[in-house]
Image: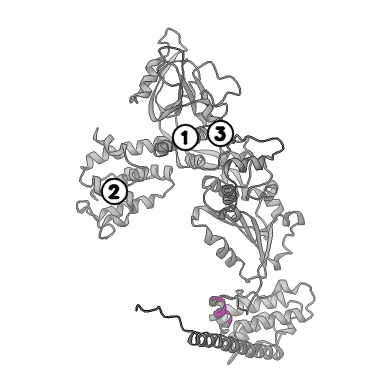
């Protein structure tokens, strides 16, 4: 059929493009808007893109179809949409919408079947009948399997079947190579019960999704440990069942597909049409392989492995950038010193995929359940026995930020992933982490040294409740902590030891400052001749030298970005943020060391600052402190002039050297 020809040789990206172009060809008066939403929802579920992404693709096509009545995105050509969209447009732009509709319906049906697939009921099926084997090898559209009498509850419509062709090689009628040969899905659930005059026997019908170029024997799966003991396929650790049907777990299916893909890379596109993106990301992820190595007597395993593989290759893999990306690091410093900026520059900038980044803020009421996840009531649509749907209250495990980023990291093993914890010690961090604390010990490759067992996390991340939990080598955890908040929740030494501690210095001067910080430090306070840098440094010095009745005054210091540019442009904002902090916190036990008049309280200080004629700092600060700020201004101006002079001298010296040693002219031809 024409619609089969349209879609059978298209990639997954081109399938999505064809759906979008079809809806662009429909006139605006067409009443199929709900069908478009439903179809886009299927694509969204399978590929992880949003409804609005697909609608934007449709809008991009609109401009090139005048008959639809929509303006769309004005552009000169389809080149800007993407390679897949351009290819689909050039091939199928002139097809009738009726033909395209049939093709789109088949595409949507295919992905709807796969995104709704129940991966808990995967089955392996072994056939020895010649007619079935020949039907598989000739790729017949529908294949009937008979003589089955077990696992009828798992042989449900659309369920995936891993098909093995059996048979004794010595038998003359076995003219095929026995072994794992195809992946199919059930198009007709158990039927024909009693066709052999025995009620237990039934049949099923299969449609082939992919046929392997060659049969894969049990020996082909020896290196893939997770595929061992897969019924009829992997090496037998226990005897296969006598019946032709057996169950396969999710992780076993991943291992089988990975082994087949490694052996036959050309089936990649077909597999992506069969399985969901989440399943295929597991296939593409790290897999445990057993390498057979000949080890001489007295030789270490490492030496033997290097000899076999190539030691340089191993070193290159170990030095790969994202291997060393994985760590637990804690930035700490005074409020406003630039901790979040450091996180952004050093770590967030390396994560190009926003889905691979999760941010969370700890606070006193934050708990382990908030961090990891918890079982909660959720309204979900369920299908009743009559085929209709209704919303029912279901209890499901709702992922917390830790489980969510862990799932993303395993599904995107080639990308750097990042968990950012702001204000780590404003919550009870050891209690929030719980047994996850043990995962923070890392191996050289960045993975967790020790595993924990948590059935909820394991089920969400690995689809196996007994699977051990570890941090993968592409996941970094970065936290921030204000030193002035150490009295909120203390962190014991054992917890802190598992973090790489990084102090963020509170710098107002120095060659290492970037232009943004230099300009911020030089910015004058509202209506004042004093700059923010001179003010903050003078106040910090006074804080450290005055007897304010408490220790650890560094924790109370003003960070270079404690006040933002907006705070420094508005007298009211500056007073309410900076002066209030100094009054209520930093100089709480020594206000007379800083403020000129403390008799009327904070409100009087703020009013005096906002209503002052002339420099407001003169009005509210003690003269000694204000004079120190003026001296600091002079010092900073002198430093700036000296730096400029040194830079000029260096440039002049460089120019002089260039004049004394001109570049050698190329010799002319004689």
Disc 2 to disc 1, C-alpha distance: 30 Å
Give yes or no for contact between labels 1 and 3 (Cβ–Cβ under 8 Å). no
The crowding category of the residue bearing disc 2, from other C-alpha atoms within 10 Å (few below 14, some 14 to 19, many at least 20), is some
* Residue 378 image offset from top left, x and y in percent: 53, 42
**Which label sits in the foreground, 2 or 1?**
1
Secondary structure under badge 3?
loop
Instruction: Return the residue at label 1.
Output: 263
Of mark 3 and mark 2, the one earlier in the sequence is 2
Residue 508: % across, % down: 63, 78
Residue 336 image point, x, y percent:
62, 71
Q: Nearer the viewer, residue 618 or 217?
A: 217
Sequence-wise, the earlier of marks 2 and 1 is 2
Is 468 placed left or right of 553 in the picture? left
Q: CA distance from mark 3 to mark 2?
A: 39 Å
Residue 476, placed above or below residue 587: above
Q: Residue at x 64, y 57 (%)?
A: 362
Mark 3 = which residue? Answer: 224
Closer to viewer: mark 3 or mark 2: 3
Q: Is residue 141 left or right of residue 427?
A: left
> Where 379 sits versus 556, above or below?
above
Mark pair 1, 3: CA separation: 12 Å
Residue holding disc 2: 87
Q: Is residue 107 magenta?
A: no
User: Which residue is outermost to the front?
Assistant: 670
Q: Magenta segment, which residues?
A: 516-521
The overriding secondary structure of the stretch rendered in magenta is: helix
Query: Residue 492 or 439: which is nearer the viewer?
Result: 439
């Amino acid at each position: 059929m024409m619609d089969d020809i349209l879609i059978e040789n298209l990639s997954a990206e081109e399938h999505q493009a064809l759906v979008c172009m079809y809806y662009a060809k429909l006139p605006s008066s067409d009443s199929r808007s709900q069908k478009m939403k439903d179809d886009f929802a299927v694509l969204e579920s399978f590929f992880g893109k949003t409804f609005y992404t697909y609608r934007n693709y449709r809008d991009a096509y609109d401009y090139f179809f005048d008959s639809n009545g929509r303006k769309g995105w004005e552009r000169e050509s389809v080149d800007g949409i993407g390679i897949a969209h351009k290819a689909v447009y050039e091939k199928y732009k002139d097809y009738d919408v009726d033909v395209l509709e049939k093709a789109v319906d088949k595409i949507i049906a295919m992905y709807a079947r796969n995104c709704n697939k129940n991966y808990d009921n995967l089955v392996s099926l072994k056939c020895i009948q010649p007619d079935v084997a020949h039907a598989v090898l000739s790729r017949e559209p529908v294949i009937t399997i008979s003589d089955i009498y077990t696992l009828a509850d798992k042989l449900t419509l659309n369920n995936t079947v891993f098909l093995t062709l059996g048979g004794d090689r010595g038998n003359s009628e076995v003219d095929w190579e026995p072994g794992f040969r195809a992946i199919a899905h059930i198009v007709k659930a158990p039927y024909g019960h009693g066709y052999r005059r025995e009620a237990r026997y039934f049949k099923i019908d299969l449609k082939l999704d992919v046929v392997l170029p060659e049969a894969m024997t049990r020996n082909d799966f020896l290196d893939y440990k997770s595929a061992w003991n897969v019924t009829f396929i992997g090496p037998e650790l226990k005897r296969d069942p006598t019946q032709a049907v057996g169950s396969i777990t999710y992780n076993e299916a991943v291992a089988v597909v990975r082994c087949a893909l490694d052996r036959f890379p050309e089936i990649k596109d077909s597999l992506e049409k069969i399985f969901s993106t989440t399943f295929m990301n597991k296939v593409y992820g790290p897999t445990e392989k057993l390498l057979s190595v000949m080890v001489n007597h007295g030789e270490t395993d490492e030496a033997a492995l290097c000899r076999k593989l190539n030691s340089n290759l191993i070193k290159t893999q170990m030095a790969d950038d994202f291997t060393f990306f994985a760590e637990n690091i804690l930035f700490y410093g005074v409020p406003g010193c630039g901790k979040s900026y450091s996180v952004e520059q050093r770590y967030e900038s390396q994560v190009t995929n926003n889905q691979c980044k999760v941010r969370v803020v700890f606070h006193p009421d934050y708990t382990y359940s908030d961090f990891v996840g918890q079982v909660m009531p959720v309204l979900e649509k369920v299908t009743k026995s009559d085929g209709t749907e209704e919303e029912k209250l279901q209890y499901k495990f709702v992922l917390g930020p830790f489980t969510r980023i862990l799932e993303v990291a395993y599904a995107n093993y080639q990308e750097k992933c990042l968990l950012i914890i702001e204000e780590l010690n404003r919550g009870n961090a050891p209690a929030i982490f719980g047994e996850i604390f043990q995962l923070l010990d890392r191996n050289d490759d960045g993975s967790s040294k020790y595993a924990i067992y948590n059935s909820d996390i394991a089920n969400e991340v690995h689809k196996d409740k007994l699977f051990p939990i570890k941090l993968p080598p592409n996941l970094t955890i970065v936290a921030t902590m204000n030193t002035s908040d150490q009295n909120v929740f203390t962190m014991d030494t054992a917890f802190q030891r598992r973090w790489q501690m990084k102090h963020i210095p509170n710098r107002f001067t120095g060659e290492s400052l970037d232009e943004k910080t230099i300009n911020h430090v030089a910015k004058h306070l509202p209506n004042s001749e004093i700059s923010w840098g001179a003010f903050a440094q003078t106040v910090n010095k006074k804080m450290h030298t005055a007897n304010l009745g408490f220790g650890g005054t560094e924790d109370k210091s003003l960070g270079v970005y404690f006040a933002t540019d907006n705070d420094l442009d508005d007298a009211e904002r500056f007073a309410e943020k900076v002066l209030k902090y100094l009054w209520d916190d930093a100089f709480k036990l020594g206000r007379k060391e800083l403020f000129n008049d403390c008799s009327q309280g904070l409100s009087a200080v703020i009013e005096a600052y906002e209503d002052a004629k002339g420099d407001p700092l003169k009005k509210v600060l003690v003269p000694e402190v204000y004079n120190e700020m003026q001296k600091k201004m002079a010092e900073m101006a002198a430093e700036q002039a000296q730096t400029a002079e040194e830079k000029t001298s260096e440039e002049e010296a460089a120019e002089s050297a260039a004049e004394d040693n001109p570049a050698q002219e190329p010799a002319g031809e004689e």
